[in-house]
Amino acid sequence: MQLPADYIEEMKLLLKDDYSYYETSLQQTSKYGLRVNISKISVVDFVEIAPFKLSPIPWIDNGFFYDPNDNVSKHPYYFAGLYYIQEPSAMTPASRLPITPGDRVLDMCAAPGGKATELGSKLRDEGILLANDISNSRAKPLLKNLELFGLANICVTSESPEKLATIYPEYFDKILIDAPCSGEGMFRREPRMIADWRLKGPLYYSPIQKELIVLAAKMLKPGGQMLYSTCTFSKQENEAVIAHLLATCQDMQMIAIEPYSGFAKGFDEYPNCVRIFPHKMAGEGHFMALLEKRGTQIIDKQVHHNNLNSDSLPAEATAFLVQVGLDFTNGYFKIINNYLYFIPLGYAINKGLRYLRSGLAIGELKKKRFEPSQALAMALKATEFKSVINLKAKDIRTVKYLKGETIDVSDCKPNCESGWQLVCVDNYPLGFGKLQNHILKNKYYSGWRMN
């Protein structure tokens, strides 16, 4: 690995006597991690059924190292949304932002969704997660990952932070900013980023980060908390950004982050910041700072009503929803372009925003028939749909279903002989199918199919 000479000099100044240990760590193999989706399965239950070689990530309650020889991205449990594949140090920011069910949470730069999926799972179907990424192309995989995780109380937008700040002043209880950065902490794992660093280093990203963190502070409620993170080492992109925020926003203050023995302290006068170095921990590089807005939480001044009326539902949608065991009292229905959505309580769709998703996509109205969505299937538990076809992970039909094939389920015993079925693997939903004469017509979303 050929590091830029000016980067080496900066790291020597930063790490001093520790630089040689850092340099040695770059020759070591990166660790691989997965994070359990606690909204679908407990950590204990996951360990019991997981067919992988796992060892706990000591600073992440629901994180595990896995053997790279295990093809974790091809297992049916991955398609059931039971875990997210994520670099171990990248799990840390979402683990250190305290989320309470019912919070309004913003992930400002959320794609591809590694941190947003954890924030959403912590909400436990209460409150709202607004996951935003300014890039529409990056926001699409973000949406997929959130829906794969079965998260219903989400809105996914592709907007500039400036626009969000005008619409949501002092609206969010918790905010995560995993800011775009020069990526110095990922050089070992992704050496191609060295070339990107030569083109766009800390001097390029620092002004962007300073603007983002101030805009985020404007959207934070008094009493709310915000976590700023990067995967880079430069003080220009880390401590200097925090200094800028504290100088610009007098109502913001730093607070301590839940500790771990391998965490390094921030530099200069910012010991409450956390740095992750690959020579000190089994991960790549990260920086974190947890901040709080002074003051007592105020009553919302914005027009985001709880008492919005649901759209009238067509008979075909009503007939289908009879089969669904979800609680639809904590929000309202909206029909947009023949698609039915369920919007979380306390959130109103703002026509000025570019949405990829608003709430839970229930399904599509098609010429007096209703077709449920993949997102709905993933948001359900096996006990929350009238008729279920449950397959085993090792059943060849499970893979055939995930590849979009029609399957024979004559040995299964669903609650009805025809119609919509929730297809599960070991009682964890994968998607829908339509049953007729013991043959299941595949309705698994084509864009998610196993290759």
Image (tube, rainbow, N blue to C red):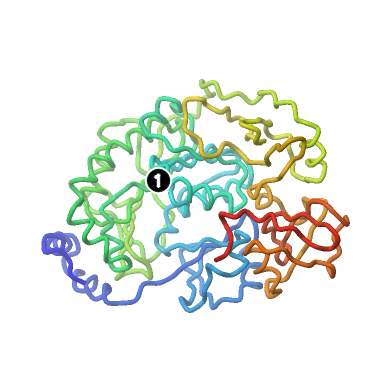
Q: Position of residue 34 (x, y in %)?
A: 50, 65
Q: Is residue 16 above or below residue 137?
A: below
Residue 170: % across, % down: 45, 28
Position of residue 73 in the picture relative to residue 430 (left or right): left
State whether residue 53 is above or below residue 172.
below
Q: How many marks?
A: 1
**Relative to 25, 48 lies left or right:** right
Q: Which residue is mark 1?
A: 227
x, y percent for residue 288: 35, 52
Q: Quadrant of residue 153?
A: top right
Quadrant of the rendered structure where residue 430 is? bottom right
SS under mark 1: strand
**Residue pictured at 40% horizontal, 32% vertical:** 294
Of the pair 435 and 226, the residue shown nearer to us: 435
439 left or right, relative to 54: right
Task: Compare residues 211 and 227 and report the one nearer the observer.
Answer: 211
* Rendered residue at 24%/46% (across/down): 205
Q: Amino acid at mark 1?
A: Leu
Image coords of residue 372 (percent x, y): 70, 45
Quarter placement of the N terminus: bottom left
Rendering quarter of residue 307: top right
Image quadrant for the C terminus? Answer: bottom right
